[in-house]
Image (cartoon, helix red, strand yellow):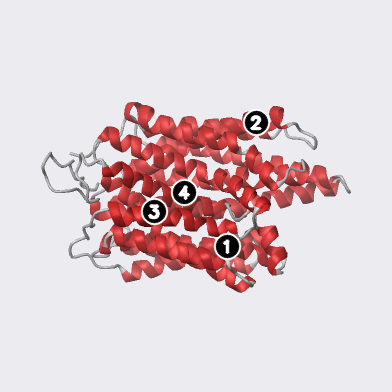
Amino acid sequence: MAAHTAAPAAGTRPDAAGTAAGDPRRWLILAVIAAAQLMIVLDLTVMNLALPSAQRALGFTATDRQWVVTAYALSFGSLLLFCGRLADLIGRKATFLAGLVGFAAASAVGGASDSFAMLVTARACQGVFGALLAPSALSLLATTFSDAKERAKAFGVYGAVSATGGGMGLLLGGALTTYLSWRWCMYINLVFAAVAIIGGVLLVGKQSRTPGGRLDVPGVVAVSAGMFCLVYGFSNAARHSWHTPSAWGFLAVGVGLLIAFAFWQSRAAQPLLPPRIVLDRNRAGAYLTILISGAATFGVFLFLVYYMQVTLGYSAVTSGLAMLPMVVLSGAAATVGNTKLMPRVGPKPMVIAGMLLNVAGMVWLTRIGAHSDYASALLGPLMVIGAGMGLVFGMVAATGTFGVAPRDAGVASASINTGQQLGGSIGTALLSTIAASATTGYLADHPGSVQLAAIHSYTAVFWSCAGLFAAGAVVCGALLRRGPLTRPH
């Protein structure tokens, strides 16, 4: 298990974030990190509601539309571990600011796009700089707060932002698309980036680098290529079929490369992902938790929006507002979970309770119909799922970086983001396949019942999500240790 760094005593030199333990600037740094994280998480969903408008404006096909999402996922997912280690090697402030500037520039280009190629290129560049920014932000947070109570509050805020960001992206995307333009779903990032850049320059102190550290080039090549193949394979499975060579072929190559990467990490002199990071049960449990949750929550953010807009006829902004109770409950549960529950009971009960709440919410959603009322059919399950997501997301960031030495903070943070991104890709492919199969089967038995077939596909997805969350409660609950988090002695 990795060694830890004790909290600095009064009068000692600043900590890894460049702030002394009692310096009030650390809370302003938290606000800067939260703004950066909100921008990243928003971008995972904010474009979803803008895609139809962007398609009409730029004239690309429905087949091409998926690439606006996939281009971001490919570059983001494949580069996370590399960029996380880069942050450890060259300093987290440098990579944090570079990620912000690059993400803002790519967003400006994307908003000004006059062609499909320009938009997709901008989205791919967003993914590159997002991969640099995300682990830098979380590792800055992990090294800035050393006091247990303050750390709990800081991670509560971070968890709330992470848990609510996807839903806020849907709300913001719907509002911007409806009242301004789809382009503002890209331009809005400039606002968040400007706040974070100014705050980062003025508040974040000089970051220490890993002394004598070198980049594990074979590891970078293996894991980046492996993640690329996995994300690309899952994306093709979602768009086409699991039986196409572009799906199973890339998935097989991706798995092979990741096995080779794991083999190499146990032998490399300076591994990209040191085994000490993932061999700790609590950290491994956190990474597995975010992977399963990332796959299952996709059912909420995509198929429920389809149901509200296609079946119930909600507008983009109305469907975003309908998600608001889930967003509010997610933020509240993440904050309370980190500040009140984590110090007393640790992550294990939080994960089990959060997963089981999500199971209950997903099962409740299976009662939807063609003319369901929002208050009776959607409000309750959305609130239950929001509370469950908050508990789960609230513990992941704190647990996944706990006990990690400063030299490994970047790559440990990147492991959390990698799990979430890979989980989302798996969920996209798996749940899309389940929905398509359910629709085909229903129409075979009930020809012409297109609307009922769609509802049947949604309920099949919600049942599958319930199963994923139930499996997560069992597996992740068994992996995590009992009791509060304690640092190694």
Mark 3 neighbour density, 10 Å: few (under 14) some (14–19) many (20 or more): many
Image position, residue 329 (x, y; %): 52, 32
Mark 2 neighbour density, 10 Å: few (under 14) some (14–19) many (20 or more): some
The amino acid type of the residue labelled 2 equals Leu
Q: CA distance from mark 4 to mark 1?
A: 20 Å
Residue bearing the label numbered 4? 38
Q: Quadrant of residue 69?
A: bottom right
* 137 on left or right of 88: right
Residue bearing the label numbered 1? 70
Q: CA distance from mark 3 to mark 1?
A: 26 Å
Q: Nearer the viewer, mark 2 or mark 1?
A: 2
Sequence-first tag of 2 and 1: 1
Asked whether residue 259 is in view, the answer is: no
The image shows residue 379, relative to residue 98, as above or below, that is above
Mark 1 element type: helix
Image position, residue 44 (x, y; %): 54, 53
Asked whether residue 406 is in view, the answer is: yes
Looking at the figure, which quarter contains the C terminus?
top left
The amino acid type of the residue labelled 4 equals Leu
Sequence-first tag of 3 and 1: 1
Question: Which residue is painted at 42% across and 49% down in the image?
Answer: 35
Sequence-first tag of 4 and 1: 4
Residue bearing the label numbered 2? 379
* 209 on left or right of 320: left
346 vs 443, nearest the viewer: 346
Question: Which residue is painted at 22% across and 51% down in the image?
Answer: 18
Q: Nearer the viewer, mark 3 or mark 1?
A: 3
282 vs 144, nearest the viewer: 144
160 vs 30, nearest the viewer: 30
Q: CA distance from mark 4 to mark 2?
A: 24 Å
The amino acid type of the residue labelled 3 equals Ala
Q: CA distance from mark 3 to mark 4?
A: 11 Å
